[in-house]
């Protein structure tokens, strides 16, 4: 049995299709990533899987429990770290954990034992008696992860767990997440719009945009899907050159963006002179050509036609427009 399975999971808000027939499976013990821009539907998927939202259609099971018919069983099986802070600044770290454990009906002896275990897991033992208002952003995030683990969940949802943190703190949080997955055998579903985060942490990644899963695979396979090497080309006539390159058997794919074309190939060093010779034979001047290994940013660009930064802007605009229309429809 998988940790999570969904079949045609869909969520609509009035006329906005936030999640569009998502079908996926997450194995037990897997660290699975949902990668996409703000507004792509990642958080909505997490909220449905955690029973905070009901789907419009489709189905999903978490640890074998139906998210609609067995909500209490689902909630007992999961831990949740929300995108927005959900800890009490007026309580100490230990008090926050104890309060959460009481909400799950844990007895005193088990609460004390588990509090010490999770504080040790996130390296906050010496900060347990400090008020949360005196914690740094990274310390609060670590405590939220500890709180999500208090009741021994089988599945942990991490919704943008390093959002707003500085790069050094972000890398520290990554280490704690890896440790949870590898040593504690917790199945983890992580949403992020940070390419390097998904690449560094996830065993498999689903790229999501406008509510749809575009492709799911390992980070290495995703990058290899567009070519082992990527040629970055500027030329006097990119349109004609791209059309001709598309006919070459050694080209795996071409993406056009920002006055460049990106050509996926194998053994890129050998393909540079072939590309230049082909352009010269067509009377096209190559003004620059370089080679590098593909990144997840390149994969996102290949499958969506936009960088994730640009998609963030368009998704935000889409949500704002929907909100404006809703206000006009419901005065």
Image (cartoon, rainbow, N blue to C red):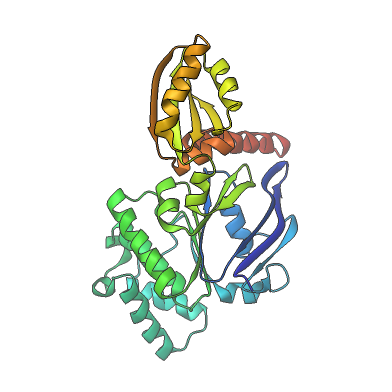
| Extreme residue in the right direction | 57
Q: Is residue 139 left or right of residue 312?
A: left
Q: Is residue 110 above or below residue 263?
A: below
- Indicate the quadrant containing the N terminus: top left, top right, bottom left or bottom right: bottom right
- Indicate the quadrant containing the C terminus: top left, top right, bottom left or bottom right: top right
Whether residue 62 appears in this view of the structure is yes
Q: Report the front residue among 144 and 267.
A: 267
Q: Is residue 72 above or below residue 326?
A: below
Q: Report the front residue among 39 and 285.
A: 285
| Extreme residue in the bottom direction | 109
Q: Is residue 166 left or right of residue 111?
A: left
Q: Residue at x 32, y 55 (%)?
A: 171
Q: Is residue 263 left or right of residue 18?
A: left
**Residue 184 screen position, x and y as percent:** 42, 75
| Extreme residue in the left direction | 126
Q: Quadrant of residue 255?
A: top right
Q: Is residue 306 above or below residue 237?
A: below
**Residue 251 screen position, x and y as percent:** 54, 32
**Residue 221 screen position, x and y as percent:** 52, 50
Q: Quadrant of residue 177?
A: bottom left
Q: Report the front residue among 327 and 220.
A: 220
| Extreme residue in the top direction | 283
**Residue 292 screen position, x and y as percent:** 39, 36
Q: Is residue 183 above or below residue 306?
A: below
Whether residue 88 appears in this view of the structure is no
Q: Residue at x 44, y 46 (%)?
A: 195
Q: Residue at x 72, y 44 (%)?
A: 14
Number of disc labels: 0
């Amino acid at each position: 049995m998988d940790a999570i399975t969904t079949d045609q999971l869909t969520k609509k808000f009035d006329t906005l299709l936030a999640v569009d027939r998502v079908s996926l499976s997450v194995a037990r013990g897997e660290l699975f990533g949902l990668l996409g821009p703000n507004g792509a539907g990642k958080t909505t998927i997490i909220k449905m899987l955690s029973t905070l939202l009901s789907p419009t259609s489709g189905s999903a099971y978490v640890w074998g429990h139906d998210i609609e018919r067995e909500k209490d069983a689902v909630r007992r099986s999961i831990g949740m770290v929300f995108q927005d802070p959900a800890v009490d600044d007026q309580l100490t770290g230990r008090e926050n954990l104890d309060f959460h454990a009481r909400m799950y009906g844990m007895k005193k002896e088990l609460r004390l034992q588990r509090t010490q275990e999770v504080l040790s897991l996130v390296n906050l033992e010496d900060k347990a008696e400090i008020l949360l208002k005196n914690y740094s952003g990274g310390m609060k995030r670590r405590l939220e992860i500890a709180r999500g683990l208090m009741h021994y969940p089988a599945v942990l949802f991490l919704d943008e767990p390093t959002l707003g943190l500085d790069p050094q703190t972000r890398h520290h949080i990554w280490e704690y997440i890896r440790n949870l997955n590898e040593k504690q055998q917790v199945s983890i579903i992580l949403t992020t719009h940070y390419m390097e985060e998904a690449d560094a942490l996830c065993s498999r990644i689903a790229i999501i945009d406008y509510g749809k899963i575009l492709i799911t695979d390992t980070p290495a396979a995703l990058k290899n899907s567009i070519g082992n090497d990527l040629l970055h080309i500027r030329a006097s006539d990119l349109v004609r050159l791209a059309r001709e390159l598309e006919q070459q058997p050694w080209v795996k794919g071409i993406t056009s963006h920002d006055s460049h074309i990106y050509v996926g190939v194998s053994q890129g060093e050998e393909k540079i002179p072939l590309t230049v010779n082909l352009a010269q034979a067509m009377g096209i001047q190559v003004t620059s050509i370089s080679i590098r290994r593909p990144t997840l940013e390149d994969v996102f660009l290949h499958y969506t036609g936009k960088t994730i930064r640009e998609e963030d802007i368009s998704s935000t605009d889409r949500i704002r427009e929907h909100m404006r229309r809703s206000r006009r429809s419901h005065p």
